[in-house]
Amino acid sequence: MVAITKPTMIHLISPVTGEILDWRQLYEEKARLTKQTGCYYGLTQLKLKEKDPIKWERLYDAIHAAVMAARDTAKNVAASPGARELGEFLAAFTTPEGDTVAVSTGLVGHQGAFRIAIQFMAENHYDKNPGLREGDIITACDPPTTGTPHPGDVYTFSPVITETGELVGWAATINHTMEAGCAVPGAWPPVSPSTYTDGYGIPPTKVGENFSDYTWFYKHLERRTRAGVFNILDQKMRVAACRMIVERIQDIIKEFGLDYFRLAIRELIEESRRMVAERIKTLTVPGRGRFVGFRTVRYKGLVDGVWPHAANDYILHLFNEVVVDTINGRIYIHGDQLSPANWHALNGYQGIVESNLWLNVVDTVGIYVKPNRGFNEAITYTIPKGALYNPPNDRYSAGDPWAGSITWFDCFDAALAMSMRARGFEEETWNGDVFWTGFQGELVLRNGFSFGFSQMDMLGASSTPARPYADGETAATAWWNPASDIGSAEEWEYVLPGLYYFVRNALPGYCGHGKYRGALGMEIGFIVSEELQEASLGKVGACSSDMFATMASLPGGGYPAPTATLVVYKGTNVLELLRQGEMPGSIRDLEAWAKTGKFKYSVKEVYKREVANVFLKPGDVYIMIGNSSGGWGDPLDRDPSLVLRDVREGFIDTATARNVYGVPLGGEDANEETLSPDLVNELRSQLRAERRRRAKPFRQFYAEERQRLLEGNLPDYIKSFYRELCGFSEKFRSEFLAFWQVDSLPAGF
Amino acid sequence: MATEGRIDAGLLRQLMSGRLSWDVIEKILRAPKTLDRFAQYMAAVAPDIRVTGKPLLRLNEYLYIVGHDTGIPTVQCGRCGYDFGDYRVNWKLNSDVYVRRSKEEFLEIYRYEEVIPEENYAEIREYYCPGCYTLLCVECVPPGYPPIFEFLPDVEGFYRDVLGQAIPGGAGGSPPADLTYEAVKEHFPRE
């Protein structure tokens, strides 16, 4: 007879009654008390804080220090370049229900999603099978069940269990890994018709014990991803961080006492919820904000033979209606005019929403608040079933959800910006258009060895939006990661041998214009060297748009940022030029050299949309252009001395200075003497007169557009967009038809 | 250093001038957010706006919601005083608009062909004030897309419940109804 060891059963204790509960009962208690009182876990009073605020703050500091130390130590233990160079890593401590109490710096938004994996484990009785023991390692990367926004985001958890068997919380970590074993190489597959092409995603899975991974999991990573070594390093990093957190939390519990700890960690969350509510009351004017962005998905002609159901082109409607209730300190997000989910990669599940939401609270109505689950508790969002971020079932791909969802939440930020500026908080106001671009792929070395990767330069180098008092700044932020960095070029060349950087710089003139202009975006260019047989590279996460400008309109009213674009030159003589000592420094050099015949190529390809794979050979050139921001106000209001500075610094050219800003400066060698206030005033008067001449009253525009609509005189893909959206969103349909005064979509649609 | 004290209208005017250093701006960003800010802000913008009536709220860079002794508050251009009508109607219906649709027209604004919006997918609309031809808002949308109504503030609720003040004339309801569609029906004939 074989002896069977029963799993160790953990128990939980209610922080408010002291009763022993099982895991599910804890969720029920929390939901009931929160609903009854409007306060997190029914905590209408912060008793422990009120009794001894210093002790209470010391507890938070101890937990916060634990997660900070874990992050900063573990990424130096073992890590892929994405975690080590760009800091794409987060460590946190959560309650037993998965609500985050404290986060490290790093990929902070994910704290909003940790609870999804933990709730999944509770609902599926992981406490009974496989059982939970201290030292268990649970890894998860399946968006529908774990909250991970996209396949490359991998979460690792480890339970904190007392000697008496009480589950008191979780160490939680996440990092953006280099490769996820998707249908196309990389970590954000932009072409993925369903969840089955999203990569190796696993629901919460016990992959180790005693803080040691099982061998099978490393073999799994080696077999099912194109970057096994990187992914094993990242797994070790997350486990190291979890172990540090678990051990430190045990010490903290000994110092503060278990009863105190159990209640105080919930009070910390309730305090943040209350403080966000207070910020809303102080910083906003009540009302309704509406912003929208558009993105395209174009699979027609790409996947037809294998996945005919996915062979369609879509325009995504990323419409966000934000209702601010200043009086009661709540904000409501309405997603009822979003596009429906479809068989493409830009859908997302709850985790992408919770992560984005948290990121957009932290720098708006969450300022100076302890960053934790309390942020999410202060905001209500509704997304109808079937919509882009609430798919009809768990078969829909979530390969590349950041691409559109960043825009959707930039729209939230924009709405808040208008509300906060109306209240007078000028300093907190900006356009909200923060975007990023990335690339990924697979390299085949000359010896035949191949591996996949994600390259994250432009994830750590977003522009800041323009403000009502300042221009946007280039490569200055990544609000999804307050400890981010563009990383070291030498490191990336070491990790990705055979891809030579030839440019990594701001691209002059690449911004949206305004009284305060957007930041110049960047160009990052590579030459494929003879160290490689082949490179297959994709353009991903192009939140900075494709066929449209970044956002459809901005709070500041200036020109939105231009599109993010991939430019590829194939069959070039660039390696020969390098051997001759000629080094291009920009796409502009290549274009200028092409005109003189110095730079030769057989094909130039321009991609504004997401790209799964472009196959490149030695001598081919690959240039990513992205990350600009839009303008604030009328360019004709810009201080002429700032226009002069921009020209002298090479940020804009004289044609833009004259035609967009109304500042005539002569040649590129402009100086103060060439800046004449009289000539500026004269030219700006002329440009305003030109506006008067070419513009038409809206009434006339309306009549012409309505006629065009009635005649169906629009491209088929535009008509298809309206047809799909009117069929899915009753609110959009009723408003669209009411605006154009038609009873139904015209026959041509 | 002014930010060691309260953030008053004078400091806000300096901020709006765009000439403060980042050192000072950061101090303003970090300073406590106090409930007197709205009054200070309206005092800061008052010298530069030419509206007829009582400015109630700043709506965007150039437009204000203005209260009147009788009647519903209206949207006015702070630069020239042009009145766009009832604030519950999207002010764009009373603007002048210029639409860019071709690659050449896009290239007048964006420098490189590689990064302009795609013609036939997107059009760029520039909304001007019919009084002074200031550029009030730019939209980049598919053809046929109704104008975006970016912000409809609850002016009545804000004045009554937050400031404890009455608005002269009618206030428009709290929360205000979006009357854009009624205005379209009334003012833009179907044929």
Image (cartoon, coloured by chain):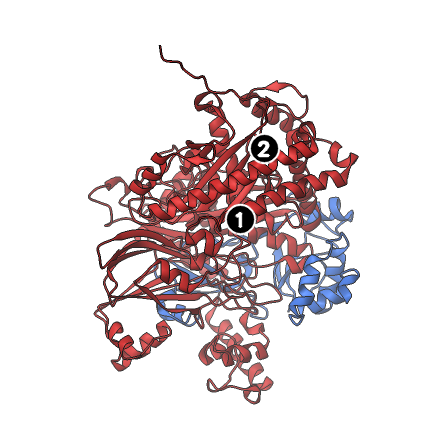
Chain colours: A red, B blue
Q: Residue at x 49, y 32 (%)?
A: A135
Q: Earlier in the sequence, mark 1 or mark 2?
A: 1
Q: Where is mark 1, residue-wise?
A: A73
Q: Where is mark 2, residue-wise?
A: A95
Report the side of B4 relative to A549 (left or right).
right
The reply to whether residue A741 is visible in this rendering is no
Can you name the residue that lies furthest to the top here? A1
Q: Position of residue A331 (x, y in %)?
A: 61, 42
Can you name the residue that lies furthest to the bottom here? A673
Foreground pick, A635 / A205: A205
In the displayed structure, A211 sits above or below A575; it is above
- The residue under label 2 is which amino acid type? Thr
Report the side of A1 relative to A436 (left or right).
left
Q: Position of residue B175 (x, y in %)?
A: 64, 43
In the displayed structure, A330 sits above or below B8; it is above
Residue at disc 1, secondary structure = helix
- Label 1 or label 2, whichever lies nearer to me, is 1
Report the side of B33 relative to A669 (left or right).
right
Q: Residue at x 47, y 35 (%)?
A: A211
Q: Quadrant of residue A470?
A: bottom right
In the displayed structure, A604 sits above or below A677; it is above
Q: Chain ID for label 1? A: A
Q: Position of residue A536 (x, y in %)?
A: 27, 56
Q: Position of residue A519 (x, y in %)?
A: 51, 66
Q: Residue at x 49, y 49 (%)?
A: A75
In the displayed structure, A587 sits above or below A121; it is below
- The residue under label 1 is which amino acid type? Thr
Quadrant in which the N terminus of chain A is drawn? top left
Foreground pick, A607 / B103: A607
Foreground pick, A408 / A527: A527
Contact (CB < 8 A) between labels 1 and 2?
no
